[in-house]
């Protein structure tokens, strides 16, 4: 495809050492956590303002809307603006939103500011493609896996930390804590991120239009976005309804105990680095099938987990391994498509990913109301089965013969269009070669 870039985009100039990878991972985790702190303390917030559960839940709804807007409108700026400046600015605005949240005099103010907090949480999605840009081809999967481990741990542990902090103090202290961590990270990143001296000369409108064209013309991106959306839909089906299960028989757990289940999910996030290394070795086709199988099969254990704590915990671990492994595999692949447009590629992918999660949350809640836990698990298993069938069908189809890509593909024996995308950027044709075994992408 042709992207209207009239200048050259340079990669960052500093090497990506282990210390900087760790900073990326921590920053992504803290940024993403801001989107999830409110979930386990909604009941406490509602009681403080005397509002109904439906009204209080708008805090989460507006933060998700803000996140979706940030994915579409802010993340692509990573291809246009020096990210060493962009990320601290976004985090500073998020800090302001968190401070106002902590001081909110009414539920209306808290709901409105949630839009800013949600939009600012996409800073993580600016940092992930930046880390991918800094890494060389041989280690890109490992780097993305490590950074994603930090992001996923932030998401999963946010619920635990929020419940514990609110339990020993108040819900306002949760927002104060989040603001403090966010502003410190903004200061750190402003000093340690390598500068990007040359950025593409492209208008903001053209920047957004090329994001849409990437989705329309890149089959690899569409395919991996589908896998991601299905995985996050299954993930959201469970995590949105889990609290409903745990407050009832036979568990009767409170907010703090329910928050601790985030620690169980964190075990799955630890597989992200392993998934990245497997992607570096070219095993992405096989790992896609394996992780989709884990996602689908986990819901059988989760169904039994309605009466067994051990099986519930085991099911959570397997579900998170499947979803997080699939996510890292997808991102390891899509970041090879267009080095100058990685932020836009990530924006397109994450919008689809988030849409899948939103649909999964809505369907899961509706199924719990009508069919309780059995309906939730059946839905999750069905979504996982669709992901598995899509992955298997894709593998079989490309084994039978190559499928034409949107761009010119070299006619070499056994070449896989998914690993050799010809993308034209800035008037220069750039051949994107595969990493490891090209046939495994």
Image: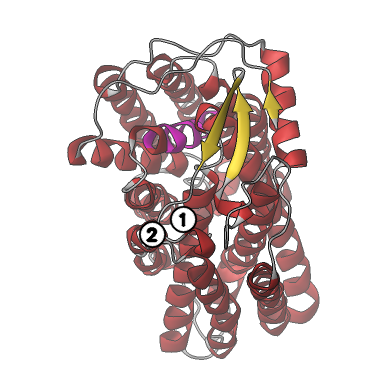
Q: Quarter holding the N terminus?
A: top right
Q: Which of 237 and 112 lies nearest the eye of the viewer?
A: 237
Q: Position of residue 122 (x, y in %)?
A: 52, 34
Q: Position of residue 236 (x, y in %)?
A: 61, 61
Side of 410 where 358 appears, left or right: right
Residue 51 in view:
no
Q: Earlier in the sequence, mark 1 or mark 2?
A: 2
Judge the density around disc 2: few (<14), some (14-19), many (≥20) Cα neighbours within 10 Å.
Answer: many
Q: Which residues are magenta?
A: 120-131
Q: Position of residue 156 (x, y in %)?
A: 43, 56
Q: Secondary structure at mark 2?
A: helix
Judge the density around disc 1: few (<14), some (14-19), many (≥20) Cα neighbours within 10 Å.
Answer: many
Q: Which of 87 and 361 lies nearest the eye of the viewer?
A: 87
Q: Judge whether 328 appears above or below 367 on screen.
A: above
Disc 2 designates what residue? 272
The disc at residue 328 is 1
Find out whether residue 206 is within the magenta segment: no
Side of 38 where 369 appears, left or right: right
Q: Name the residue at 72% across, 77% down.
A: 382
Q: Are discs 1 and 2 less than 8 Å apart at CB?
A: yes
Q: Position of residue 376 (x, y in %)?
A: 69, 76
- Measure how far apart labels 1 and 2 are at the Cα level: 6 Å
Q: Name the residue at 51% across, 51% down.
A: 333
């Amino acid at each position: 495809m042709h992207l209207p870039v009239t200048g050259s985009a340079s990669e960052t100039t500093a090497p990506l050492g282990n210390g900087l990878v760790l900073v990326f991972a921590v920053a992504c985790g803290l940024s993403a956590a801001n989107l999830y702190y409110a979930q386990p303390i909604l009941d406490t917030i509602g009681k403080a303002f005397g509002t109904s559960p439906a009204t209080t839940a708008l805090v989460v709804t507006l933060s998700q809307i803000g996140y979706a807007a940030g994915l579409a409108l802010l993340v692509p700026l990573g291809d246009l603006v020096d990210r060493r400046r962009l990320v601290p600015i976004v985090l500073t605005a998020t800090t302001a939103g968190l401070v106002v949240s902590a001081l909110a005099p009414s539920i209306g103010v808290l709901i409105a500011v949630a839009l800013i907090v949600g939009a600012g949480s996409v800073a993580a999605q600016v940092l992930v493609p930046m880390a991918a840009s800094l890494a060389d081809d041989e280690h890109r999967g490992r780097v993305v896996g490590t950074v994603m481990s930090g992001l996923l741990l932030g998401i999963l542990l946010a619920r635990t930390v929020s419940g514990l902090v609110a339990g020993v103090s108040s819900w306002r202290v949760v927002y104060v804590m989040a603001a403090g961590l966010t502003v410190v990270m903004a200061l750190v990143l402003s000093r340690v991120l390598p500068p990007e001296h040359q950025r593409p000369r492209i208008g903001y409108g053209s920047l957004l239009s090329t994001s849409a064209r990437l989705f329309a013309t890149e089959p690899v991106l569409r395919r991996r976005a589908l896998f991601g959306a299905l995985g996050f839909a299954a993930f959201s089906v469970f995590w949105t309804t889990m609290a409903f299960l745990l407050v009832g028989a036979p568990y009767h757990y409170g907010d703090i105990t329910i928050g601790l289940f985030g620690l169980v999910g964190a075990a799955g996030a630890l597989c992200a680095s392993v998934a990245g290394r497997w992607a570096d070795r070219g095993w992405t086709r096989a790992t896609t099938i394996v992780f989709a199988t884990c996602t689908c099969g986990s819901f059988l254990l989760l169904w039994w987990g309605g009466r067994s704590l051990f099986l519930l915990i085991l099911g959570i671990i397997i579900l998170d391994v499947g979803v997080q492994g699939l996510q890292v595999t997808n991102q390891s692949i899509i970041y090879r498509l267009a080095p100058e447009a990685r932020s836009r590629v990530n924006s397109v992918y994450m919008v689809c990913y988030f849409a899948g999660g939103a649909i999964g949350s809505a369907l899961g809640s509706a199924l719990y109301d009508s069919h309780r836990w059995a309906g939730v698990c059946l839905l999750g298993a069905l979504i996982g089965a669709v992901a598995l069938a899509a992955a298997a069908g894709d593998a079989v189809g490309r084994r039978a013969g190559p499928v034409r890509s949107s761009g010119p593909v070299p006619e070499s024996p056994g070449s896989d269009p998914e690993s050799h995308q010809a993308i034209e950027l800035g008037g220069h044709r750039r051949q994107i070669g595969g990493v490891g075994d090209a046939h495994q992408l």
